């Protein structure tokens, strides 16, 4: 029997099929473990897990008390990955994140030498809590780490352990004394995840479960090595040319000067998305396909991820702000106006 090969995944390879099955079941097991501490927020959990499987970083935005920090910390506990929380404040310095050289005396020789003391960035899952409360100089300390998975201090480069993720949180209502994230840094976040108040039944369960005695014990369904293998598998999932072109057309139409931009985008958008948005749409679509038990990306995968991928990349102008038009509304217009190919997936 000749092997059936779709793209770069060999559907007759026991190793490929087993790894794909392991990723899908691992995703379900992680969700099951998270449910021991996190109630509801299905879309948020899904987007956080897609971030893990792609190997990206995500920004989680929501008012206080919605378990943003708890979600990321619980995820690290479930996966047994090294976790570091950095509380961003106005007086935080870049060296407080990356680490710095310190003078240390050798107890045997009495000689002093410079020794590197790693900062909290040297972890597997880093929570940048309230990232917009620190000045841009300190925010930018994360840029190299997020993009290259390394940091450079005093001309020396230090590689970060894999897997490595940054999850940043932001409070959208307390804006006094905050520093908006530069567009270059926003663009490095795969998703802008919005977490909102849950429905009444879920909120009741939150109150009930958190006001009683709990002794939660987590199982470890997936290891760090598994996550690295999943990330490699995701990049091998085939995406048909029409699907990639559809993702790219959504991104190109988000730019107000583009000939394909809808009227709403031309009127209300200040800047559109970069090519990185198209890359994350496709990569996120690949991860979503695998966790759904499929070996190819569909148009629906792209559409399902359009809001979290584009909402922080499509920046509104003064007219939009004065009329109450949001980035999410512009993404809606993109999904309405950019035609989805009829043939194919």
Image (cartoon, rainbow, N blue to C red):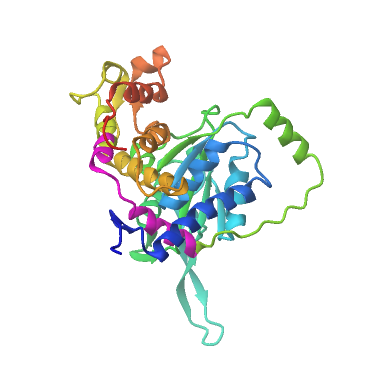
Given residues 100 and 10, the one toward you in this image is: 10
View extreme (front): residue: 1
Any magenta on residue 124? Answer: no
Instruction: Name the quadrant of the N terminus.
Output: bottom left
View extreme (left): residue: 259
Residue 139: x and y in percent read 43, 45
Instruction: Name the quadrant of the C terminus.
Output: top left
Residue 184: x and y in percent read 33, 41
Query: Does residue 90 appear in the picture of this structure?
Result: no
In the image, taking residue 193 as reference, residue 201 lies left or right, namely right
Given residues 140 and 177, the one toward you in this image is: 140
Q: Which residues are magenta?
A: 225-246
Image point (41%, 37%), residue name: 181
Image point (47%, 59%), residue name: 227
View extreme (right): residue: 213
Residue 150: x and y in percent read 38, 60
Q: Using the rendered view, name the quadrant where residue 310 is placed.
A: top left
In the image, taking residue 149 as reference, residue 251 lies left or right, namely left
Task: Name the dominant secondary structure of the magenta segment.
Answer: helix
Compared with 329, 283 (above or below) is below
Given residues 277 and 245, the one toward you in this image is: 245
Q: Using the rendered view, name the quadrant where residue 247 is placed.
A: top left
Query: Does residue 143 appear in the picture of this structure?
Result: yes
Compared with 267, 328 (above or below) is below
View extreme (bottom): residue: 108
Residue 230: x and y in percent read 43, 57
Compared with 84, 213 (above or below) is above
Image point (53%, 62%), residue name: 223
Any magenta on residue 244? Answer: yes
Q: Using the rendered view, name the quadrant where residue 264 is placed.
A: top left
């Amino acid at each position: 029997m000749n092997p059936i090969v779709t793209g770069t995944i060999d559907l007759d390879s026991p190793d490929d099929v087993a790894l794909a099955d392991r990723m899908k079941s691992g995703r379900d097991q992680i969700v099951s473990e998270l449910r021991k501490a996190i109630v509801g927020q299905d879309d948020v959990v899904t987007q956080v897990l897609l971030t893990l499987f792609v190997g990206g970083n995500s920004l989680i935005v929501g008012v206080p008390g919605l378990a943003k920090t708890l979600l990321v910390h619980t995820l690290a506990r479930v996966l047994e990955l090294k976790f570091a929380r950095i509380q961003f404040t106005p007086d935080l310095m870049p060296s407080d994140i990356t680490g710095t050289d310190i003078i240390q005396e050798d107890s045997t020789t009495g000689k002093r030498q410079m020794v590197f003391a790693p900062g909290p960035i040297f972890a597997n899952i880093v929570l940048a809590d309230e990232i917009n409360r620190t000045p841009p100089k300190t925010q930018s300390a994360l840029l190299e780490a997020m993009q290259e998975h390394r940091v450079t201090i005093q001309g020396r480069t230090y590689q970060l352990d894999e897997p490595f993720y940054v999850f940043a949180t932001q409070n959208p209502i307390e804006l006094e004394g905050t520093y908006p994230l530069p567009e270059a840094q926003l663009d490095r976040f795969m998703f802008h995840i919005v977490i909102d108040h849950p429905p009444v039944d879920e909120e009741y369960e939150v109150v009930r479960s958190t006001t009683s005695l709990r002794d939660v014990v987590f199982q470890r369904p997936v290891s760090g090595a598994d996550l690295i293998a999943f990330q490699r598998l995701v990049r091998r999932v085939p995406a048909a040319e029409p699907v990639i072109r559809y993702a790219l057309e959504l991104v190109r139409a988000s730019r107000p000067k583009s000939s394909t931009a809808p009227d709403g985008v031309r009127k209300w958008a200040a800047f559109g998305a970069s090519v990185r948005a198209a890359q994350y749409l496709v990569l996120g679509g690949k991860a979503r396909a695998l966790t759904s038990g499929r070996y190819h990306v569909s148009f629906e995968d792209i559409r399902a991820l359009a809001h979290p991928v584009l909402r922080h990349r499509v920046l509104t102008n003064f007219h939009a702000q004065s009329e109450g038009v949001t980035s999410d509304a512009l993404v809606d217009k993109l999904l309405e106006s950019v035609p989805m190919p009829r043939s194919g997936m």
